[in-house]
Image (cartoon, rainbow, N blue to C red):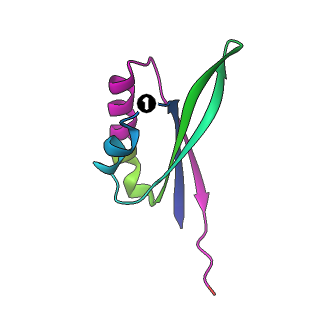
Amino acid sequence: MRTVYRLYTERRPNLAELTSRYFDGFTLIDTVGYWRGNAEQSAIIEVIGTSTDYARVLDLAHAIRISNGQQSVYLVRTKCELVRG
């Protein structure tokens, strides 16, 4: 069983570089988020891993929070299945 981790954060130029320090493979999605009615440049970082990757994902979320000067970074964990063939 695999786990999909999605981190929601403010978009900053160094996100890919920062994320690659923790994971070899990931998806970075540029998007527009809204906070209290105001639009802001946002990003979703998606990592597909295992439950053992959770500690590294938390470390990454903390590093992003510090780097972006944010109060929080949202993390969503979802179990998924790899289908072959």
Q: Position of residue 33 (x, y in %)?
A: 64, 27
Locate the C terminus by quadrant: bottom right
Q: Position of residue 18 (x, y in %)?
A: 32, 41
Q: Position of residue 37 (x, y in %)?
A: 71, 13
Front residue of 68/65: it is 68
Q: Which residues are magenta?
A: 58-84
Q: Residue 42, relative to residue 46: is it above or below?
A: above
Q: Residue 35, relative to residue 4: is it above or below?
A: above
Type of amino acid at the residue the image marks with label 1: Arg
- Report the residue at 44% width, 60% height from top: 50
Q: Is residue 39 left or right of residue 41?
A: right
Q: Residue 22, relative to residue 43: is it above or below?
A: below
Residue lying at the far bottom in this picture: please name it: 85
- Report the residue at 38% width, 31% height from top: 64
Residue lying at the far right in this picture: please name it: 37
Residue lying at the far front in this picture: please name it: 13
Residue 45 visible in this rendered orientation of the protein: yes
Residue 74 visible in this rendered orientation of the protein: no
Front residue of 76/63: it is 63
- Report the residue at 32% width, 44% height from top: 17
Secondary structure beneath disc 1?
Answer: loop
Q: Residue 35, relative to residue 49: is it above or below?
A: above
Q: Position of residue 54 (x, y in %)?
A: 41, 48
- Report the residue at 57% width, 40% height from top: 30
**Magenta stretch: includes residue 26:** no
The count of marks equals: 1
Task: Provide the residue designation for mark 1.
Answer: 12
